[in-house]
Amino acid sequence: MSAKRLVLAIFLTAAVLNFGWEMAQMFAYMHATRMSVVALLSCSLAAIGDAAYTVVLYCAGKVASANECWPLRLSAKSSLMILLAGFVTAVLIERLGIYAALWRYADSMPVLPVLNVGVLPVLQLMILPFTVFWIVKRISARRLAVPR
């Protein structure tokens, strides 16, 4: 799979998975209604931002490892870096969003003590990049296995 196709596969897979996550966690935010045009647009924009984050994560790993296929063969070190980057990025985004009054948590949102940020968005940026890379790895392996 070429680097351009890999980036496109990462972005599209991340956008779809993050849209699902965004919609599923709406219950944990104040003034969020499940099915409205505003909710769909809000979740779509957030999912596009999350997908862009995943592509930036891929690019950073590509530069750090000097290997454009690094997410297809994750090492313990790169896995730890994905977790750490997801945690730090999510905490920063959530703190900024709360400070700027872009969103507020409902009582149903579990919150990390001391940091006062939601657990769900932190888990999102820690877990979904692994899921995206795993799906893209499966897609690329299947494409390589199919004779042309």
Image (cartoon, helix red, strand yellow):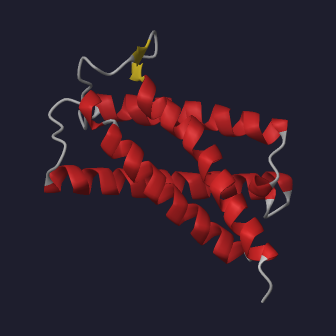
Q: Nearer the viewer, residue 77 or 16?
A: 16
Q: Position of residue 27 (x, y in %)?
A: 25, 32
Q: Position of residue 91 (x, y in %)?
A: 48, 29
Q: Residue at point 39% right, 28% down?
A: 95
- Pick out the residue farthest to the bottom: 148
- Pick out the residue farthest to the top: 113
Q: Position of residue 3 (x, y in %)?
A: 72, 73
Is any part of residue 63 visible from this angle? no
Total marks placed = 0
Give the quadrant of residue 93.
top left
Q: Quadrant of the N terminus?
A: bottom right
Q: Position of residue 115 (x, y in %)?
A: 46, 16
Q: Residue at point 79% right, 62% down?
A: 69
Give the quadrant of residue 5.
bottom right
Asked if residue 76 lies left or right of residue 35, the reply is right
Give the quadrant of residue 143.
bottom right
Asked if residue 79 lies left or right of residue 90, the reply is right
Q: Residue at point 70% right, 53% down?
A: 60
Q: Vertically, is 70 above or below 116?
A: below
Q: Vertically, is 86 above or below 39?
A: above
Q: Nearer the viewer, residue 63 or 29?
A: 29
Is any part of residue 32 visible from this angle? yes
Asked if residue 72 lies left or right of residue 84, the reply is right
Q: Vertically, is 122 above or below 117?
A: below
Q: Residue at point 15% right, 40% down?
A: 33
Q: Quadrant of the C terminus?
A: bottom right
